[in-house]
Structures are given as structure tokens and as C-alpha cells.
Image (tube, grey):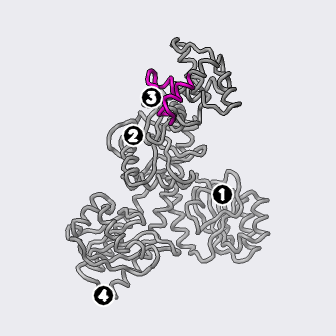
Amino acid sequence: MLAVPDLVATLPGLLSLAVPHDGAEVDDLTIAEPAHGLVGQPGDLVLGIGAVTAASAAQLVADAAAAGAGGVVLRRSLARRKTVRERARRRRIALVELAEQASWAHLVWLLRGVIDRAAVGPGPSGDAPVQDDLFTLADAAAALVDAPVTIEDAQSRVLAYSSRQDLADPARVSTIVGRRVPDEVLATMRGQGVFRRLARSAEPVFVPASGGTKPRLVIPVRAGGEWLGSIWAVVEQRPPAALVAELVQTSSVVALHLLRLRAQADLSRRVAADRLRGALSGHAGGAEDWLPPPPWRVVVLGGEGDCELLLDLWESVCRRRGWNHPLLADLDGRVYALVSDDDSASPGAWGWLASVVRRARDETLPLTARAGRSAHLPAHLQRSKAQAQEVDRLATPRRPVATHDQLWAEVTVARAAATLAGETLGPLAVLRRHDDEHRSDYLRTLAAWLDHPGAPTQAARSLHVHPNTMRYRMTRIADLADLDLDDATVRLAVRLQLAGALRGSEPSA
């Protein structure tokens, strides 16, 4: 069963939720024919294709609710009528709006793919029918222009390709092998303004030969003004206008397939994120059925932007680097990943993720990845998440990639200091009062002195003061607080209290 809000969310701009109903779920479609008694059954999403008046729409809503249907889809103009909405609320059934100019036939086709996808569950196998259709379309387009063709999404990932790719140039071969356009080719195309034209216009683009690559004819694939992808044909010369026009017509069919593929991918992402949120929140029942083999690490992913934008950014980064079905989720204001506890370069492994962050930072993309310890059972994921949060709090900007294992010392001190937060024991209370009353800096001075034992010059440098200033302050501290710093227990106790007292300030070391 698929929740109606989740179904609507897979087709933004086409569908919107007019009247929600808690627990509304669907697993099939019915085209309403009230004259023949077809108004849906339990679990159906009823399509009100024949409803043309507010009265007939309200009656369909009532009949579908009586039959136990999960929801009703009506044209926006009808779904927004007060009588129709009130009927849906009273009868406790979800009401969905369909955009005025949208095709019912296209909607049926897209919804069928999404619902079938939900029945199959997330994973690449559910994409197979659409992918097969795209390969067929690629072959058809190649036959039109007598040239090898690829169909790519807006991120230059190869979705399908025709036969005869052996006749193309090395750049195309690399594209097929890697299932995405090589970075150097992308840079050349961007420099020529190809992607800017594809994003802004529906007009075909002819790219002349350059740097050992053959000419390309590029047909943008658009739907409702949105750029979804493109058809790329490696040609010897600019094709005749009639052939280009036929290829443009083919692009409209490709657009439907890309919409359906995107809807399926959005649903897959939504289901995977919901599962991961549950596992990270302690609801790990059945997680073995969809998790990769253990052990795992939970990772807090960082970067610029709010949580939603950051999740989208990481989704794009992971897919671009080969992790086709990344385990990502947003939870409690953070973005998390679940990776295999493996130092290899395989997509989805911790070693791979660490290298992705380092490469991204080399390209001035400020990403971070802070991981908890290894988890061998789904029940341990919540603990790994808490550890990842600790690392994210304690790691400095100079440690964009870090694990809980690596920061054991910082974690130990932070945990001990946390138990002392807000409470100052012994002579340190005198120094705290002096700092508060006289704006002195004795607590940080003492911390620096302890962090650089026997090296007053280094201690002074860490505070950006002269060594003589450092010595004077330590003399005053000795006068104010009776501290025996030759005693190892005293030094440890003082430093732990200072760690709690100075939390949030710049580290002295």
C-alpha cells in the first residue's frame, strides 16, 4: 500500500493534495464509470475522468468513500469547489487535484508506474520496464538519424543507449562504459554553452567537432517547460531539418518515460529514507531485509545550506560518484548516511565516502563526513548515530573527515567535562569569579599552561600573548588559587573542569 501524500509527492506540478485524510493508502487505479457502478473498491485511487460538474464530482466522492476507496482524483477546478471539498472531509476520503491542462492518459500511465513500483519495492529491478522502453526509443532515434544515440538525464547520467556505439568516438565509448559523461567532456560542453542552451530552450543544438570528438546533435527533452534530459546523437554532419523534426517528436515520448522514471526514483528515495529514519530512531525490525551486509557506520553529512538542500546536494554527489541507490535520510535537522564499514573504494563504503569528501573539498565544495563506530546489528545503528553526532560536535574544521574511533581522546574529555558543566569545584571557582569581575583571562591561561607542560612560550603563543605576560598571569593564578599543579590528580581534575567551563570557546591548543 502506498500513502496518498507520498504518491502525490512523486508527481509535483501535476498532482496536489486538496483534502488530506490520515491513513489514506492506495494500491491500484480505477477509472470511474458511475453509470456502470464502477466507483472503486478498497485500496483504489479513483480517477474522476467523467466528472464535469460540482454535483457529479461530489457524488463520485461520496460513492468512492462508501466503496472504501483510498482517494479520488479530480480536475483542479472541481476539486477546489467548496461542496466537493466538504463532501470529502465529511466522508473521510483523500481528495487529489489534477492540473487543468494535464492529460488523463499520461496521468494513468505515470500513476501505474509509481504504484507498480511501490508493489515491487525500491531497487533497480523496479526500473527495468521503463529502462527497456528507453533503450527501444534510443534504437528508434538512432535509426532515424543513422547514428549512435544516448538518452541522458539533466545530470548527464546515461539512462539508455542505442546499438552501433562502436562507430562513435572515444568520448562516447567512455560515456557508455561509465554510464555518465566524462568530466573533461562536460567541461568542454559547458565552455561551449551547450548545457545553458539546453536548460533554457526547446530548440535542438548542433555541436561541431572539437578536440577529437565528432559532431553531436542534441535534442532537449522537456515536459511542462522543465528540462528533464536530452537525446545525443553522434553524427558526421548536421542532419536535414526533416530528420531533426522527427527526432524532436521522439523527444516528447522520451519525456513521458523520464517523468515516469523520475516518479519511480522519487518514490524509491522516499521509501528508503523512511526506512533509514526508522532504523536510526530505534525501529530496526525487518531492517536486515533491505540493509547491505554488516558491519555499517552511521555518518553525519555536512555542508552548506539547510537540511533539505543539503540532502539534495548529497544525493546528487553520491549518484554522480557511482552510488546509485544511496542510503540517505534527514532526521532531527541533520543529514545522515548509512555506509558499509569498509575502507575500500566501492561506492557506499566508508573509504569511498571519505575520498568523495576530500575530492569535493579540493573542488571548493565544503562537505564533511563524521562517522560513528561500527554497528554489527540493526539494533546498534541508533548508538552509531549518537556517536556520529558526537564526532560532528567535536571535530574541528581541519578534520572534515573523522570517525569516533579517531577522536576517542576528545570524546573521553568531552563526556567527562559534560558531567561537570555548570559546576565548578575547588579553587577554580575563585578564578572564574575573577574573570567575571575583572574581565581577566585566567581560566584560558591555566588551560593553555596545562596543555603545553614545560613550554611557556608555546602556551603564550596559543593565547597570542607575550611569554612574560603568560608568566605574570600564572603568578597571579598561584596567588589567587591554591593549586598544587605538581600533583597529577589535581592537574587532571583542573583540566577536566576547564574543558567544561570553556566549552564553545576556541581551543587553547
Element class at badge 3: helix
Q: Disc 3 versus disc 1: distance between alpha carbons?
A: 74 Å
Q: Disc 3 versus disc 4: distance between alpha carbons?
A: 79 Å
Q: Is residue 449 magenta?
A: yes
Q: Amino acid at mark 1?
A: Gly
Horizontally, residue 429 falls left or right of residue 327, namely: right
Residue at 68% x, 70% y: name it: 34
Residue identified by numbered label 4: 240
Expressed as whole percent of the image width and height from the top left, the position of residue 326 reads: 44, 48
Lower sequence index among marks 2 and 4: 4
Q: Say if 379 sits above or below 85 in the image.
A: above
Lower sequence index among marks 3 and 1: 1
Question: Which segment is the magenta one?
Answer: 448-474
Lower sequence index among marks 4 and 1: 1
Q: Say if 41 sits above or below 427 in the image.
A: below
- The disc placed on residue 474 is none
- Give the label, 2 or 4, closer to the camera: 2
Element class at badge 1: loop
Element class at badge 2: helix
Lower sequence index among marks 2 and 1: 1
Residue identified by numbered label 3: 457
Residue at 59% x, 15% y: name it: 483
Q: Disc 2 versus disc 4: distance between alpha carbons?
A: 51 Å
Q: Amino acid at mark 4?
A: Pro
Lower sequence index among marks 3 and 4: 4
Residue identified by numbered label 2: 350
Q: Disc 2 versus disc 3: distance between alpha carbons?
A: 40 Å
Residue identified by numbered label 1: 70
- Give the label, 3 or 4, closer to the camera: 3
